[in-house]
Image (cartoon, rainbow, N blue to C red):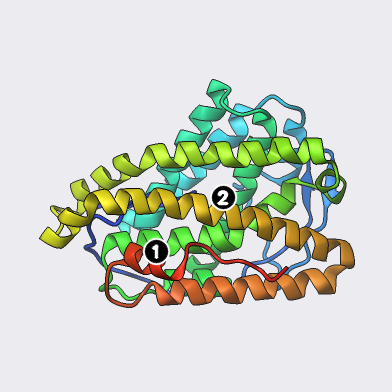
Amino acid sequence: MDRAGSGGHGSVPEAQEHQKSGPCPERTAGRVIRSGDTVAPLPTVTPTAAPAATPTATSIRASGGGSHNGPVIDELIARMAALLETLEAEGDQRRYFHATYQRTTIAVADEIKRGGFADPGWVERWDVAFADLYLDALEVSQAGRRPSRPWDIAFSASADLPALRHVLLGMNAHINYDLPQALLAVITDEQFGDPVLLARREADHQAIDGVLASRVGAEDDELTRHSGPPPLLDRLLGPFNRLGTQRFLREARAKVWANAIALNRARAQGPDAYAALLAQLEELTAAKVAALQAPGQVLLKLATTGFGVRLPG
């Protein structure tokens, strides 16, 4: 890999930072996404068509039931790999987040195949829907347009920022903004009203945290391998940063679950209410991502200002 970095579901410590930034990016889109056997309408802002290579809503729905459909997530990983080749060939700084996200997606796929979730079929559909939001934003950006504000800020960050910073910008955009939408794509209004089923979904949501936490040390090693030894201060802060990353993931994802419930309530009120609340989430996330571009230790800042974002109510 040409100085690979780190990426998505998110897992990375702030042990070192070195590298560059690249291109710029237009607004992502909402579309009707099927959830299990039921269509869950997600009204959002400007629509974008999903690329042909993406596992479609129909193919995700067809995987149905409780067992996973390996080719669907394998197809997703192949799509990510093809995009990474392009990013690396162009020396694009977005490769740092993308490479980490790809490795994390592989780890989640392995856990699905191992049987580590209560409902592996649902986790797979959710994982694909989640990744699709990021990949659509990336491809919009690559086409010279601008994705949603959190991704616009993350993708157009200064080329002078270290590699780790690009990873953390991507993590914050993806977890805080995309993840609640992905949950709504695979949990219908009716399912949100079923406490037993919702508890199973939340348990699988929390089980992902274990997969992410297990990646923190490995991603730290990847950054060291591709970016070189970190400065002395970063080395001294290494243990804190690894713990801080794990705390960030837990706290941010807990807020994600609360935000998904708030968005579902808005969805039940109609497209306008949903679009208005989603716009709030976009602005809250954009502000968080923008704040992380300032100089200094990012995880120290997050520990002070709080991890994740929270919608009112």
Question: For this rendering, which residue is in front, 140 or 18?
Answer: 18
Residue 174's x, y, as percent?
A: 53, 59
User: Taking 252 as reference, is 289 above or below it?
Assistant: below
Residue ranking furthest to the front: 304
Looking at the image, residue 74 sits to the left or right of residue 272; the answer is: left
Q: Residues within 10 Å of mark 1 (few under 14, many from 20)?
A: few
Q: Which SS class for mark 1?
A: helix
Looking at the image, residue 200 sits to the left or right of residue 79; the answer is: right
Residue 145's x, y, as percent?
A: 54, 75
Mark 2 and mark 1 in contact? Answer it, CB < 8 Å.
Answer: no
Q: Can you identify the residue that label 2 sits on?
A: 131
User: Taking 8 as reference, is 160 above or below it?
Assistant: below
Does the image show residue 233?
yes
In the image, which disc is placed on residue 229?
Answer: none
Residue 177's x, y, as percent?
A: 59, 63
Question: For this rendering, which residue is in front, 145 or 233?
Answer: 233
Say which amino acid is labelled 2: Ala
N-terminal-most mark, 2 or 1? 2
User: Taking 151 as reference, is 113 above or below it?
Assistant: above
Question: For this rendering, which residue is in front, 50 or 94?
Answer: 94
Question: For this rendering, which residue is in front, 144 or 138?
Answer: 138
Residue 190's x, y, as percent?
A: 88, 46
Q: Can you identify the residue that label 1 sits on?
A: 303
Residue 96, located in which quarter of the rendered image?
bottom left
Q: Residue at x 58, y 22 (%)?
A: 115
Q: Nearer the viewer, mark 2 or mark 1?
A: 1
Say which amino acid is labelled 1: Ala
